[in-house]
Amino acid sequence: MSDHIQSEPPRRPEYEPTEETHDPLVRELRRRVRSLEQENRRWKVICISALIVLILVIIGGGVVGLVTTSFYTHRLREAQLRTEVEAMRAQEALEQARQAAARQAEKGAK
């Protein structure tokens, strides 16, 4: 039942003779393989580094956005409260002016 499931990937066969080969083609192919493996590792490091930088930029942008939004929301609330307080003061002043006018009218009517 578990014949088709393998716990580890199959290993690639490696050609490593015990004695130094004198065949120029084999030496050139080995050199190319080593070079390609080094480039592959280098590109993997570059991609992982770029991914980490991208993630940090996204997280940093999110944090900056949250802080900025919180700051502006706080300032907006303060402005709304100031406007409400000023409106209440104006309403009180208007009410006092009406009461003063009513008192003046009563004094003038007497």
Image (cartoon, rainbow, N blue to C red):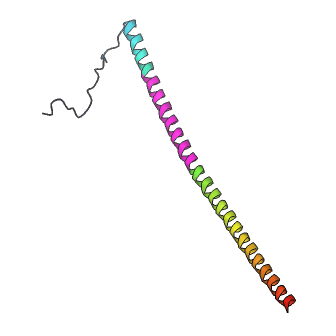
Quarter holding the N terminus is top left
- Quarter holding the C terminus? bottom right
Q: Is residue 61 above or below residue 74?
A: above
- Snapshot quadrant of residue 100: bottom right
Farthest-out residue, front: 109
Q: Is residue 95 magenta?
A: no
Range of the magenta residues? 37-62
Which residue is painted at 59% across and 50% down in the image? Answer: 65
The residue furthest left is: 1
Residue at left offset 74%, top offset 77%: 92
Percent position of residue 91, x then y: 73, 74
Residue 85 appears at what percent x and percent y? Answer: 70, 71
Along the line of sight, which residue is nearer the eye, 35 or 94? 94
Above or below residue 71? Residue 108 is: below
- Prevalent SS, magenta region: helix
Tell me which residue sits at (84%, 86%) in the image.
104
Q: Residue at x 77, y 76 (%)?
A: 94
Q: Is residue 49 magenta?
A: yes
The reply, left or right, for residue 83 in relation to residue 28 is right
Give the camera-side residue of 47 and 58: 58
Q: Foreground: 107 or 93?
A: 107
Residue 23 % position (x, y): 36, 6
Vertical order, 7 against 17 (above or below): below
Location of residue 53 (image quadrant): top right
Which residue in the rendered view is the most extreme toward the right?
Answer: 108
| Rendered view: 108 above or below 49 | below
Instruction: Count the marks.
Output: 0
